Amino acid sequence: MPAYTAPEGPQPAIVIPAAGVGARIGGDRPKQYQNLRNSFLIDITIERLIRVLPEATIMVTLGSEDGWWAHTRSAAARHIHTCTGGASRAGSVLAGLRALTMPAEHPVLVHDAARPCITSSDINALVQAVGDSDSGGLLAQAVTDTVKEVDDTGHVIATRDRRHLWRAQTPQLFRSGVLEQALLMAATGDITVTDEASAVEHLGLHPLVVPGRADNIKVTHPGDLAMAAWFIEQQQQAGGAGA
């Protein structure tokens, strides 16, 4: 029995926006090329996706002056392609979609390069839950902390009801045509979107939230690298890499 089972049906294409520099993490390189367990962070992320979706075409969007990608393991893979990303995340994802040749109804999975702890169980859950829905969906974590809204001076305005609040994660999964239309509308309408789901919401659609694991963290600050390494070690001990 294989360690990883691909979801049934056509495997989605994958877009990985990796054109940013991730300045908050510091160091001499963009965060996607930081060292994690003796590998580039982005290599670990991509290899985890491939274990679940081995037949997927992957498009990685890079900065115009990227000098690191050529040194990754992923650069040698025939089914992994690159294109130049945009000035924003939305622009990079749109560039990735346009660089792929696929029908409008084909599913596209978008995943952060800096989320190396993604598991096969979460990917499978997302793909199976979204199915062929026009609205798509995303992994997310329910908010468990008390949430305060504050004003510009740091004083509390209100305490928000957390029962309906979720922290968005990736992957996020949508039909190619729906996502491209949403990102184009955001770009031409000067609408700020922070993830793919927020763009799709502006089309009047309601993406499905699929509960994800708490260890699917996004590496943002220097301390996150050690946390990600620990999470990966725990996952391997519990049931194999990408469990």
Image (cartoon, grey):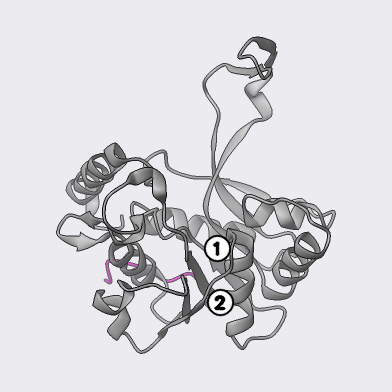
Of callouts 1 and 2, the N-terminal one: 2
Residue 216 in view of the camera:
no
Tag 2, which secondary structure? loop
Is 55 magenta? The answer is no
Q: Is residue 147 above or below residue 220?
A: above
Range of magenta residues: 1-10
Q: Give percent across and percent down for residue 160.
A: 68, 18
Q: Main secondary structure of the magenta part?
A: loop
Quick check: is 8 in the magenta stretch? yes
What is the quadrant of the C terminus in the image?
A: bottom left
Q: Say left or right for 229 vs 137.
A: left
Q: CA distance from mark 1 to mark 2?
A: 10 Å
Q: Point out the frontmost of discs 1 and 2.
A: 1
Residue in the picture at 69% in, 17% down: 151
Residue 95's disc is: none
Q: Nearer the viewer, residue 117 or 34?
A: 34
Residue 9's mark? 2
Q: Is residue 62 left or right of residue 100?
A: left
Q: Decide: marks 1, 2 in contact (CB < 8 A)?
A: yes
Circle 2 residues within 10 Å: few <14, some 14–19, many ≥20: few
Q: Which residue is located at x 71 percent, y 78 percent?
A: 105
Amino acid carrying mark 2 in the image: Gly
Residue 233, position in %: x, y? 19, 47
Residue at figure coordinates x 69%, y 85% from the top left: 103
State the residue position of label 1: 127
Q: Which of the pair 66/50 is nearer the observer?
A: 66
The amino acid at mark 1 is Val
